[in-house]
Image: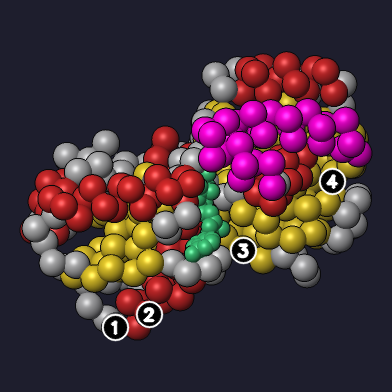
Amino acid sequence: MRLVIIVNDYAGHGRAKRKFEKLSKTLQTPYILERTNATGHAVEIAKKYGELQEPTLLLTIGGDGTIHEVIKGAVSYEHLVVGVMNGGSGNDFGRAFPTFTTAHQIESFIQNPTSLPYDLGAVKSVDVEDVFMNNCGFGFDAVVTYEVNRSKMKAWLNKISLGKLAYVWILIRELFRFKPFDLTIENHGHLKNCYFVVASNQPYFGGGMKISPNSISNDGLMELTVVHDITKLKLLLIFLTVFFGKHTKFNTVKSYKSSKFDIRLHDSVIGHADGEYIGQAKENQTISYFVQENNWRLGYNNLTK
Ligand SMILES: Nc1ncnc2c1ncn2[C@@H]1O[C@H](COP(=O)(O)OP(=O)(O)OP(=O)(O)O)[C@@H](O)[C@H]1O
């Protein structure tokens, strides 16, 4: 099996770059190195190897955004297997899926490749279309993600390893600015004053929050979680309980399970897929979430974690 290593030097504020440098000192197996040069490049890299028809491990060293792009490009190419070494900041993928940590694990995989198929979520409306291996949400979570990613303060604080401070500051600032929206979920009814709605294919989001504790990534189903009708102070308290997956006990948190959801937001609200901004859904447009069952393969063996 051919080994292609895809590295996003910028992921994890240089963490992915350092991981690759360390790996390259011990890895004996020949490999092709692909460094991403911009947002979206990893999709093109994966597609390029999809067209070459040779069994290939796309070993991705980066964060959730880079992994998202590689899976998006690799989807439906049966000879492509995605492998991951965590190199991001949040690494929600690595909390739910097995990942490689050493050169020895990768070498033993190349000699004896084993992989399993996983589901991919899809989201589609007139203005928004994407896929997700972790989760895809509209509302407050997307606003915080968007503001954190474009924040100059975060870039500066990261240089002195205080990036999380920027996250907390932006979360509180946006909480006071955010205007809740009404939401209709087809076949499930209408909810008022919603802060966010998120569809999940695995439990974790936002860097370790267990937003959807019962999500399983290869069951052909997704979970929809909505937080609604709640004071801003209580929402902050609920954020603390999310780390332990205990928020679902509050009656202001609703969860649904299905292979497909059609929702309508009664305001124009921005969205994210796997923590990357995907655009703004216009008010009252139908947004369809659905599961593409078992359509990408993850490589790992009994040595991976
Ligand atoms: N050469 C590049 N320069 C700038 N951005 C890049 C480059 N290559 C990829 N990107 C983009 O960098 C963004 C962040 O990458 P990624 O999500 O992997 O890291 P992270 O944000 O540190 O990790 P996490 O999402 O796990 O918190 C992605 O949107 C990706 O498309």
Identify the residue at image location x=81%, y=36%: 174
Q: Which residue is mark 4?
A: 184
The disc, 2 or 3, on the residue closer to the chain's N-terminal end is: 2
Front tag of 4 and 3: 3
Residue at position x 40%, y 40% from top?
A: 94
Q: Which residue appears farthest toward the bottom when viewing the image?
A: 52
Binning the other alpha carbons within 10 Å of mark 3 as few (below 14), some (14 to 19) or many (20 upward) gives some
Asked whether the beta carbons under mark 2 and mark 1 sit within 8 Å of each other, the answer is yes
Quadrant position of residue 210: top right
- Could you say which disc has been placed on residue 52 in the image? 1
Work out how far the residue at label 2 is from the one at label 3, CA to CA, in angstroms: 19 Å
Q: Mark 4: which secondary structure?
A: strand
Ligand 1 near label 2 (Cβ, under 8 Å)? no
Mark 2 vs mark 3: in front: 2
- Left or right, 285 with respect to 65, comes to right
In which quadrant of the rendered image does the C terminus lie? top left
Say which of 274 and 183 sits in front: 274
Query: Where does label 3 land, which residue?
Result: 130
**Residue 48, label in figure:** 2
Could you tell which of marks 2 and 4 lies nearer the N-terminus?
A: 2
Q: Is residue 96 left or right of residue 116?
A: right
Q: Earlier in the sequence, mark 1 or mark 4?
A: 1
How far is the residue under mark 2 from the one under mark 4? Answer: 40 Å
Q: Which residues are magenta?
A: 152-179
Mark 3 vs 1, N-terminal side: 1
Image mark for residue 293? none
Q: Amino acid at mark 2?
A: Lys
In the rendered image, the vertical position of residue 288 relative to residue 182, given as above or below: below
Q: Amino acid at mark 1?
A: Leu
The local secondary structure at tag 1 comes to loop
